[in-house]
Image (spheres, rainbow, N blue to C red):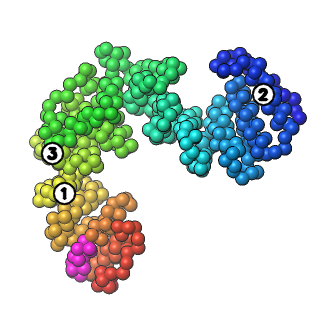
Amino acid sequence: MSAIPEFSINQKTYCQKLNGTIEQLRKEFDLTFVELGETADLQKRAALCLKLTTIFRRFGEFSSVETYALKALTALNKLSYEPSGPNPVDIKIELLWAYLAQKKYKQAKDLASKTIRDNPPILSDQNYLRVPSLLNLGLARAYRGLKKFSEAEEVSRVGKDIATNPSLKVCILLEFTRACRMQKKFGEALSAANEGLESPATGSNLQAEFAKEKKRIQVAIGTKENAPNDFAAEELVAKELLALKSKRVDVAEALSIRSVEELFNGPIPFDVDPTPYLETLLRITEESLKTFQYEQAIATAWVCWKCKPDKIKDKLSLLFIIIFCYNQLGFFPNAAYVGEKAFELFEEASSPPPNEGIIKILILLTHALTGQENYDEAIRYALIGKKICEKDDSIPSYVRASLDYDLCVAYRRNKDFQSAVETLINLIKNNLKAPSQNPTFDRCLDEEIFLLDKEGYIVQFTKEWKYNKQVADRILEGLKNYSPFDLPYADSEVLTDID
């Protein structure tokens, strides 16, 4: 047996935080090390190696933690899993922290990812509720060490929401704060830092870390130079977003038409003028959209609207985001109101922006009005869009296709099946000339073919287009591709009729 190793670090420093004295830990270590050398039982060796890793970790000897954690795993790999024996996940967590402490971020990332992916049965045990959060925290730290801040943000965003242990939750929140700051997402970073500072689970050490992060963020956005009372607009927005999480303040107020009118026309009071920070606010809004946080995007977009952007293009871009989010959340009356206001702005503009922008808004407006079952108005606005498209060759084919699709849906829902099929045939012809390259759109087109076939109108009208084999083939392809249950399309009269 090899000699008992000497610890190379200042033992006193590491033992001050422990309940035992240096002598007690040393005695425990000696006994464990001797016992390890005397046993050949693999399960017992794994348990002893795990015990040694915890002692080495307390003394900061992370290379030894790595060595003995690997020995423990090697022993367990030769055995079938025993619930009464050492838990392999415990060993992997010790190894994960050893890798992180030694800045072996690639190994840490691979280990954490694989352990999460394997999802061992022990994770569902009530005694191990902390394990998923520990793995999530370790993975976020590894990504940050690899300077993959986007991945660190993604992992910690999920982790902070699912963590059940309050102490671990704020640790993951700190990782999220750092990942956002490194990507210059200062609004979200500041929001997370404030949340960490206000959490009762944040101990004194983490309080200091959150305070440092907050100061770094404020310096980065020029708080002291640009805003009174040491508050930047980002901090104001961050506080609003924190309130939004718990009370749904802005969104709740915007769920009725009357409130939407007030948001559109009336003032929203601010302690700080947010106008100089419009660019940052827009970035926060766009990031919320990318992560499907539509309520947060609506809140920040309305804040941007109150900054009174000068250019009509900027105004329409903001209103587009608001309409899109309302549609995604199913608040069609609100989306329709804002969409009609946006179209009025476009018509009244002395120097209107390129037509592509207003066509996109008309698509959303058509969708919103169809969602309200106001089919006549939906069709009217879609036809206005088609007239604009006829006069402007610069509008991309995918925008035209989206408009035709929503018009087709409105016709079908309004039971004007002849117009629906004619619009569908036209859409297919144009799509054959310029394929969408968008699987989601192709899937929607398949669905519309299927639904019109279900009404019995595809057969009637496709006979008139039978000479266009490409169109007929695309219809057949849609019928084969689509089923509401994702099953192969069954034999039908349509196939026989067209063939």
Q: Is residue 253 above or below residue 332?
A: above
Magenta-highlighted residues: 452-464
**Magenta-colored stretch includes residue 457:** yes
Amino acid type indicated by mark 2: Phe
Q: How many residues crowd mark 1 within 10 Å: few (<14), some (14–19), many (20+)?
A: many
Which residue bears the numbered disc 1?
370
From the image, state whether disc 3 or disc 2 is nearer to you: 2
| Quarter assignment of residue 486 | bottom left
Which residue bears the numbered disc 3?
337
Is 264 on the left-hand or right-hand side of 165?
left
Q: Main secondary structure of the magenta part?
A: helix
Quarter occupied by the N terminus: top right
Q: Secondary structure at mark 1?
A: helix
Is 163 on the left-hand or right-hand side of 435?
right
The first of marks 1 and 3 along the sequence is: 3
The Cα–Cα distance between marks 3 and 2, rounded to whole angstroms, is 72 Å
Q: Secondary structure at mark 2?
A: helix
Residue at the image position 70 percent from the left and 42 percent from the top: 86
Q: Secondary structure at mark 3?
A: helix
Residue at the image position 78 percent from the left and 42 percent from the top: 44
| Quarter assignment of residue 402 | bottom left
Can residue 389 be seen from the camera position used here?
yes
| Quarter assignment of residue 130 | top right
Disc number placed over residue 29 in the picture, else none: 2
Residue at the image position 56 percent from the left and 34 percent from the top: 141
Point out residue 488 in the picture as x, y percentages from the top left corner.
41, 73
Amino acid type indicated by mark 1: Thr
From the image, state whether disc 1 or disc 2 is nearer to you: 2
The Cα–Cα distance between marks 1 and 2, rounded to whole angstroms, is 73 Å
Point out residue 75 in the picture as x, y percentages from the top left corner.
76, 46
Q: Closer to the camera, 429 or 193?
A: 193
